[in-house]
Amino acid sequence: MIAKACGVSNATVSRVLRGDHSNGFSVRPQVRDRIMQTVAELNYRPDLTARSLRAQQTHVIAVLGLNHQWKSASDVNNAAIGAAVDVLHELGYSVCTSFPKPAADGSSAGQLPPWRVDGYLLVGIQTKDSLMEVEASGIPYVGINTRVGQKGYACQVDDDLGIQKVLDYLQEMGHQRIAYRNGSADRARPDSHAVLDRHAAFVREIRSRDLPLLDHHESMVMEDADFLSDSLRQKATAILAYDLTESIRLMQAAYQLDIQIPKDISMVGFNDEYPAAMLTPPLTVMGVPARSMGRQAAVMLVDLLQGREVSERIHMFDEQLITRQSVARV
Amino acid sequence: MIAKACGVSNATVSRVLRGDHSNGFSVRPQVRDRIMQTVAELNYRPDLTARSLRAQQTHVIAVLGLNHQWKSASDVNNAAIGAAVDVLHELGYSVCTSFPKPAADGSSAGQLPPWRVDGYLLVGIQTKDSLMEVEASGIPYVGINTRVGQKGYACQVDDDLGIQKVLDYLQEMGHQRIAYRNGSADRARPDSHAVLDRHAAFVREIRSRDLPLLDHHESMVMEDADFLSDSLRQKATAILAYDLTESIRLMQAAYQLDIQIPKDISMVGFNDEYPAAMLTPPLTVMGVPARSMGRQAAVMLVDLLQGREVSERIHMFDEQLITRQSVARV
DNA sequence: TTGTAGGCGTTATCAA
DNA sequence: TTGATAACGCCTACAA
């Protein structure tokens, strides 16, 4: 250790740098100052590689599932990750991401960073392959809005309940004929369960309420304008859109077609992220508590790492309806 | 080492796993197979922490300047980084990013990951603080389209020449009155030199050619539609837009205002990224050779790391005009 | 209050 | 062809 060059043992330096007060107070101020000065002069930074080797832990968490190529548009993920990262920082962990090296066998595995980390935070779309890879690593992990494997923990949103709440509200407002605008953003990713699940939940709920199920199954590949006019043709009084992106695009299309929201048709979206409240009209949405989920995921992960008991393997969150002005009473 | 549990020394295991053929061929096939089998059974993975400590290098490169919060829209960066990452992977390096922990003193420093890496790739907007931090780390780095400090290497684009080429072309096509649409995407980042530099280069070139300088300085805060009608009012025959984002927004606004491109006014953008060729009409752009820059940056960084001589500290790239159908002859 | 020594998992060197 | 050993930089008992 370089700082020993000021005439003191490396053990003392280590103690000073880490403010180690384990046995009494230790360290003469005079020595302390001399060390700090030398450290500053030499711009010395302890080698975390060695520290990690010694401690058998890195205090680094990797976020898996971020897409550096296509930057998934979902703001929900961003909000959740941001919250999780804040918590992790507070608890003394660093957070990293890896640009995954494409797997030699062309599978969707190979996302794990080669360097050593203490835990994983899973977001976005996880394929079976990638989940298996994570499981096999033996490293603790928590998924945020993601399916997880046997050993995995997760924070998930109760989408079924969310759909129920939306429909409760829409029915309360007198709506019967409700169209569903499916998600198209993840069209390219066949493993995206979120899109399929939400749609399935919608169909199930509509049926169980004996509401009319409009022809909207093919809406995943319909143009926005076509979807709107088709919905009106089917006398829909409200549209439920898969996510904010879809809502915004539909509202833009409506504007161009001179369809007024909510006068001509009501609109409900998902995810209460940034522009939702700024739209014209302000959009009523089912809000996913992204930041809470992120925070909770971070806490769960750290609990796991520090050997604390984690009561629920899957922590469920409720969506909250945020009523603004895009739904009219019929 | 666990795999020693199959009755052989750790040195041998190490040799087998790394395919070490340094002294003759070594290793009896029988022993080799036994080791490989045990490794597979125990799902053993060498500890990179220890390897890094021993080798005094990590084979990890960190990308600095990516914004996990606001997702900078620039596709140029993405393309460059993607290319750089590919090269680095091929050369045996891993690539990571850090979610920076906000600096305690609130400065823009604190972007460096705490874990040990061999080199940095700088992208996006680098403030003086962050550059100083990188310099002080003593770790080799290469900037991609970024200013760098004393010890830094970089791949940069010759923007002045690019502006000259555009104006050459526009003049050749008979244009005299050329409006400049400034960048607004980075408005929030006062340290963004790219926006200011390109604008300054444009003004300088227009003056040196004795072309009329239209009133467009305030365009950074003008609505797209206003900018268009104002340009027409000033009898501009062509618009040069800061980047693809601006071009696309202007073209959308033009469509809504029933202004036809290039009949009513010509348009040139910057950055030949994905949608440029798909627009109506296909957009003529100054193409920044993002992928070449990324590749070159990666090569330079690895050369630095491996002690090879790097001839140019700043490697300049030329922009290429890609003529499509958004410019008409006047 | 400070120093000594051992070990974390690897790999390179040298010896067998 | 294989094994023993030292060293990378750090932390922590334990000894002084």
Image (cartoon, coloured by chain):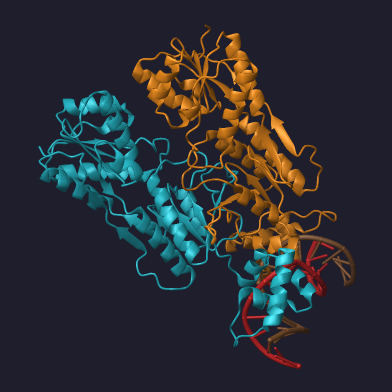
Chain colours: A orange, B cyan, C red, D brown
In the depicted structure, whether residue C10 falls above or below residue B126: below
Q: Residue furthest top?
A: A330
Q: Is B31 situated left or right of A230 in this image?
A: right
In the depicted structure, whether residue A273 falls above or below residue B319: above
Q: Is B301 situated left or right of A43 in this image?
A: left
Q: Quadrant of residue A142?
A: top right
Image quadrant occupied by the N terminus of chain A: bottom right
Q: Give x and y (percent) for residue A122.
A: 63, 44
Residue drawn at (60%, 19%), measured in percent from left and top? A206
Residue drawn at (41%, 43%), measured in percent from left and top? B191
Q: Quadrant of residue A57?
A: bottom right
Which is nearer the eye, B235 or B88? B88
Q: Give x and y (percent) for residue B221.
A: 33, 29
Residue drawn at (48%, 54%), measured in percent from left and top? B132
Which is nearer the eye, B162 or A193? A193
Q: Give x and y (percent) for residue A157.
A: 65, 31
Res. B264 visible in picture: yes
Residue drawn at (26%, 43%), measured in percent from left and top? B200
